[in-house]
Image (cartoon, rainbow, N blue to C red):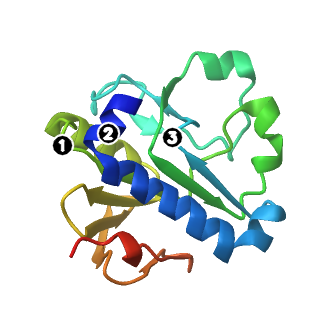
Amino acid sequence: MHYQEMAVFPRHGEILERIGDMLSVKYISEILSNKLIKYRENNALVYNGTYGCFDKSPPFELVNVNEKFLPQAELKAKRYIQPDYMIFHNNKYQKHFSTYKIAGCPDLIIEVWSKGNEAEDKHILTKLYATSPITEFWQIEQDSNEVLCSLGETLLPSQSLLAPLQTQGGLEIDLTSIALP
C-alpha cells in the first residue's frame, strides 16, 4: 500500500501497526528465539499458476517450501503475493530464509481490506489462501469490527475486534483499542 493510500485508509495501517506492537510485547521471548516470526507487507509468499486462474495447470495454490526447499533460480520462476500481515509460529525452516527466501506457508495471514480493493481481488486472494490447509486467514474490513476467519477451505466462527482475537494455534492478538465504537 502506498503512502497516499494510507492517508485515505488510515485504519489499515493502524490495524497492522497495532498487531505488530501487541505481538512484540506479548510474545517477545518467542520472537527473540525465532519461534514466532511476523512480517508486515514487505515479504512475499510463493504461488503456482496464473493469478486468478483456479482451474489451470500448474495449479493456482500457495507453495509450501517447508516440504522441499527451492533454490533461488527456481523461486524466481514462481509468482509472489504480499499479504498485509503474516505470522509463522514454530517454523523450523525460517532459519534458512536468507538462502531460500520463502519458508513455507504461514500459520496466519491477515488482510485488511480497503475500499479500493476490488471484489475480484478479494475473491482471488481468499481462494489462494484457502489452498494451504495449515494457514488461518483473517479478513478485516475498514468499516467493520467483524473478523472473518478460515483455516484452509474451512470457515471458522467470525471474531470481533471488540474482544481479543485468538488463532487456532493459541496466539492472542488484542486489537480492542482500535475497534470502531
C-alpha gap between disc 3 and disc 1: 18 Å
Total numbered circles: 3
- State left or right for residue 163 relative to residue 16: left
Residue 150 in picture, x, y percent from top left: 34, 65
Q: Name the residue under label 2.
A: 7
Label 1 element class:
loop
Of mark 2 and mark 1, the one earlier in the sequence is: 2
Q: Nearer the viewer, residue 156 or 110?
A: 110
Residue 146 in picture, x, y percent from top left: 24, 70
Q: Mark 3 points at which residue?
A: 41
Residue 126 in picture, x, y percent from top left: 30, 48
Residue 56 in picture, x, y percent from top left: 31, 25
Of mark 2 and mark 3, the one earlier in the sequence is: 2
> Mark 2 or mark 3, which is nearer to you?
2
Where on the picture, by quarter, is residue 115?
top left
Q: What residue type is disc 3 on?
A: Glu
Where on the picture, by quarter, is residue 70?
top right
The quadrant of the rendering that contains the C terminus is: bottom left
Q: Name the residue under label 1.
A: 115
Q: What residue type is disc 2 on?
A: Ala
> Mark 2 or mark 1, which is nearer to you?
2
Vertical side of 98 occupied by 139: above or below: below
Is residue 134 among the parts visible in the rendering?
Answer: no
- State left or right for residue 44 relative to residue 10: right
The quadrant of the rendering that contains the N terminus is: top left
Which residue lies at the image location 32% right of the left edge and 39% below the top edge?
Answer: 7
Label 3 element class:
loop
Label 2 element class:
helix
Which residue lies at the image location 68% right of the left edge and 47% below the top edge?
Answer: 66
Count residues near mark 1 (Cα–Cα under 10 Å), then give few for <14, some for 14-19, many for 20+.
few
